[in-house]
Amino acid sequence: MTGRIALKSCRLPPTFDRLTVMQTESGDRTERWRESYSRVRKDFLANPQSTNLKRLRLLGVDRLPRTARLLDVGAGDGNLCRTLSEMGFSQVWGLEYQAELLALHPQRERVVAASAIHLPYRTGSMSAVIVMDVLHHLTPAQLPCCYAEIRRVLKDGAALYLCEPAGTFFRKALTVLLMSPLSSVSTFARDKRAMVAAERDTLAPWLASERAVADRIVSHGFRLEFFRRCWLHSYGRLRAV
Ligand SMILES: C[S@@+](CC[C@H](N)C(=O)[O-])C[C@H]1O[C@@H](n2cnc3c(N)ncnc32)[C@H](O)[C@@H]1O
């Protein structure tokens, strides 16, 4: 609101004003998403570490040397970093663009405020990149920049490990259910619905085209090692070539 008043007094062109209003709306949406996400994490995922551990094992991250330099893109509150540290990894770096989540990170000195489309790391400096539940927050225009940046920071022969919502029938059905009035029955479902609603601009196109994601990443200088769809998530490992 304050931003809009300031803009009016500057007499900026109407298109600029509209753009700012859109940004304000998406800022509100991010805040609503963060509130629901934090509640879901706190109240319902009391032990995210065991989920993380299962996912990391499925991807093969547990087979990496414990001194490998790992980059956690979209690190959130740092729960993945906690799991990796418990697994014995000593070089876990991260980036996250929401300051409020960044502040909760257990290794604040290892994580920077940055966007997944501009990774503030040297070319070929990482032994692995882990992206967990982040790509579906990016717009179709941002995704190629993110893939190219991940390839740039990875050493040749190093791997990208992915876990993202899968565009399966089960996931789509669940999303429809969440958006229906039925979902008001529990706080958990209400929060999940708020998250899906806040992510809708990027989640819907992601789910619609997720089957082709591996091919798109491959075109940025990767070899596909595997891409597996489960009920709700897909898991992929791609090697930088
Ligand atoms: C569902 S959370 C997952 C967090 C963490 N990876 C995990 O598995 O717990 C998605 C995270 O991606 C972050 N994110 C979304 N778009 C981003 C971007 N363009 N750059 C950096 N982080 C982003 C969000 O702020 C959020 O913390």
Image (cartoon, rainbow, N blue to C red):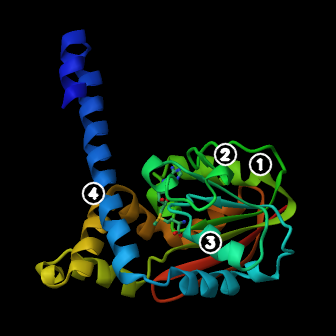
Q: Secondary structure at mark 4?
A: helix
Asked whether, in this view, residue 209 is left or right of residue 194, the answer is right
Mark nearer the N terminus (4 vs 1):
4
Q: Position of residue 63 (x, y in %)?
A: 82, 82
**Of the two numbered discs 4 and 1 in the rendering, the one whose residue sits closer to the viewer:** 4
Residue at the spot of label 4: 32
Disc 1 designates what residue? Answer: 152
Q: Nearer the viewer, mark 1 or mark 3?
A: 3
Whether pointer 1 and pointer 2 mark residues with C-beta atoms closer than 8 Å, the reply is yes
Ligand 1 within 8 angstroms of badge 2 C-beta? no
Residue at position x 77%, y 50% from top?
153
The N terminus, quarter of image:
top left
**Gap between marks 2 and 3 measured at Cα:** 21 Å
Residue under label 2: 119
Q: Where does label 3 land, which residue?
A: 82
Residue neighbourhood size for the residue with mark 3, other residues' Cα within 10 Å, grouped as few (<14), some (14–19), many (≥20)? some
Residue 68 drawn above or below residue 235: above
Determine the image quadrant of residue 127: bottom right
Identify the residue at image location x=31%, y=44%: 27
- The three-letter code of the residue at mark 2 reads Leu
In this view, the mark in front (4 or 3): 3
Residue 220 image position (x, y, % from top left): 72, 55
Q: Are marks 4 and 1 in contact (CB under 8 Å)?
A: no
Q: Which mark is residue 2?
A: none
- Say if residue 218 shows up in the picture: yes
Q: Amino acid at mark 3?
A: Arg
Q: Position of residue 233 (x, y in %)?
A: 50, 80
Q: CA distance from mark 4 to mark 2?
A: 26 Å
- Image depth: mark 2 or mark 3 in front: 3
